[in-house]
Image (cartoon, rainbow, N blue to C red):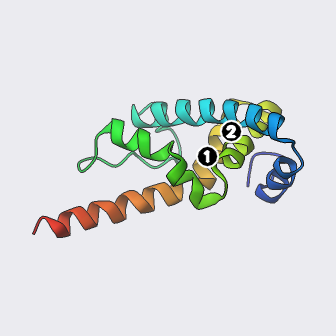
């Protein structure tokens, strides 16, 4: 990962060492950062560089936002609270852009894959 010193395994180790209270605090920050990322991405404010464009057509922005920030989606990466705590740790230690990059590299590829799969399933069921 290109966010400085925080590799995914190091982040998981740091979160694993947190007691429940501090972990929830970091997760609360991470949830806010993930929400900001999702909103800016869906509004097209993050289209600079290599970030993929949000999918259009099958789903509304509200649906995509709800999905990418949901515990159901985050559980694909582990305990949702701990996933959000990782984002919060990156934000605290390296700043907002690094946290956005973490989300882009770690969460967004699977999200886009799932959106694509759901789109295909919807088109197939409509035939």
**Is residue 24 visible from the viewing direction of this image?**
yes
* Residue located 42% across and 61% down the image: 114
Quarter of the image with the C terminus in it: bottom left
Question: Which residue is outermost to the front?
Answer: 20
Q: Position of residue 63 (x, y in %)?
A: 34, 42
User: Residue under circle 1?
Assistant: 103
* Residue located 26% across and 67% down the image: 121
Crowdedness near tag 1: few (<14), some (14–19) or many (≥20) residues, C-alpha within 10 Å: many
Judge by depth and name the residue closer to the eye, 92 or 41.
92
Q: Position of residue 113 (x, y in %)?
A: 44, 62
Question: Which residue is outermost to the left?
Answer: 127
Crowdedness near tag 2: few (<14), some (14–19) or many (≥20) residues, C-alpha within 10 Å: many
* Residue located 81% across and 59% down the image: 9
User: Tags 1 and 2 in contact by the CB under 8 Å rule?
Assistant: yes
User: Residue under circle 2?
Assistant: 99
Report the side of 14 relative to 48 (left or right): right
Judge by depth and name the residue closer to the eye, 113 or 49.
113
Relative to 97, residue 64 above or below: below
Q: CA distance from mark 1 to mark 2?
A: 6 Å
Q: Position of residue 68 (x, y in %)?
A: 48, 46
Q: Position of residue 64 (x, y in %)?
A: 38, 43
Report the side of 27 relative to 31 (left or right): right
Relative to 8, residue 98 above or below: above
Element type where label 1 sits in the image: helix
Quarter of the image with the N terminus in it: bottom right
Q: How many numbered tags mark residues here? A: 2
- Check residue 1 in the rendering and tell me which mark sits there, or answer none: none
Element type where label 2 sits in the image: helix
**Is residue 91 visible from the viewing direction of this image?**
no
């Amino acid at each position: 990962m290109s966010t400085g010193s925080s590799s995914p395994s190091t982040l998981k180790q740091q979160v694993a060492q947190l007691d429940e209270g501090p972990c929830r605090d970091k997760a609360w920050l991470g949830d806010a950062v993930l929400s900001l990322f999702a909103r800016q991405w869906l509004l097209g404010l993050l289209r600079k560089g290599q970030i993929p464009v949000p999918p259009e057509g099958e789903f509304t922005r509200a649906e995509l936002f709800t999905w990418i920030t949901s515990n159901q989606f985050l559980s694909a990466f582990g305990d949702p609270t701990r996933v959000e705590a990782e984002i919060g740790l990156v934000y605290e230690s390296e700043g907002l852009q690094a946290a956005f990059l973490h989300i882009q590299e770690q969460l967004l590829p699977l999200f886009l894959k799932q959106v694509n799969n759901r789109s295909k399933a919807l088109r197939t069921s409509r035939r």
